[in-house]
Image (tube, grey):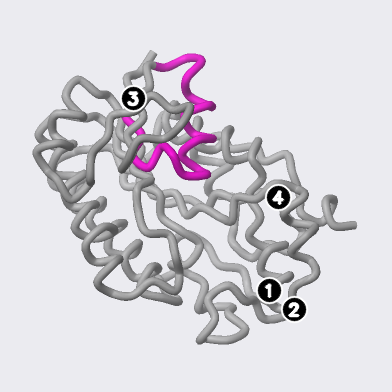
Amino acid sequence: MARVAVTGAAGNVGRETVDALSTDHDVTPITHREREGLDSVILDVRDPEALMEAFEGQDVVVHLAANPDPDAGWESVYEVNIGGTYNVYEAALAAEVDRVVFASTNHVHQMYNIADPARPETLAEGARTVRPSDPPRPDSYYGVSKVFGEALGSYYADRYGIEVVNVRIGWLLTPADVREKMDEEPTVARYVRAMWLSPQDCRQGMRRTVEASLPRSPLAINLLSANDDRYLSLTEAMRTIGYRPRDNSGMVVD
């Protein structure tokens, strides 16, 4: 049993992560404010002292707290996504945490196949395959902030020996949400089909990032369902952490 702190525990991915880990691990949810139905440590990731106190005695930190809006302005992502991630790594180092799982995003690579550069969540036809090792091509300030977070993790892994998993998360939606979004314009619907991450695949994948032995660190993987229309490679996630996605957007919308 590992002791796992989860920042951003009240978000969609956060709640799935807490549920996935709570049966076999000692989980400490961390939220920005009080949330109904969730017993959590309340703090702001911009507060380094509070983070250090929360991480004391933890084995793993899953860092999900961020402004996830691809249309967010620079100041917002700078304070929370960049400054907050720095604080998380410094606190993890001070608390001698073994592993940090960093919630990155598909938006670090989205410009490879975007339909409209001014609209991050669109996808062109005939998208090329993109692997985790391909150079970043972020589509937004949000994507840029996650490229920074991955680079920061590489620094802490190489210099201090912290195990780091950079998880480029797809779009977590219920099957009903996916079907509803098929009424959007074709470039948006195509993006949804490519990037879908089902709740059960999310739970399994996040659990594996915490429990799997890592072949190397830092490790970068994509986390989405086994969608027929995906362009982000899942091979690395399947081989390195044993991820086995069960869902497919093509089966949901057909």
Comparing labels 4 and 3, the label whose residue is closer to the camera = 3
The kind of secondary structure element at disc 3 is: strand
Residue at image mark 1:
188
User: If you read the primary sequence from the N terminus, does the residue marked by circle 1 or circle 4 appear first?
Assistant: 1
Q: Name the image quarter holding residue 190.
A: bottom right
- Residue 203 sits in which quadrant? top right
Question: Disc 1 marks which amino acid?
Answer: Val
Q: Is residue 153 magenta?
A: no
Left or right: where 98 falls relative to 177: left
For badge 3, the amino acid type reads Thr
Q: Nearer the viewer, residue 219 or 245?
A: 245
Quadrant for the C terminus in the image: bottom right
Q: Secondary structure at mark 2?
A: loop
Rounded to the nearest angstrom, the CA distance separating label 4 from label 2 is 23 Å
Instruction: Identify the secondary structure beneath mark 1.
Output: helix
Residue at 74%, 44% (x, y): give it.
Answer: 247
In the rendered image, the quadrant that contains the N terminus is top left
* Three-letter code for the amino acid on which mark 4 is drawn: Ala
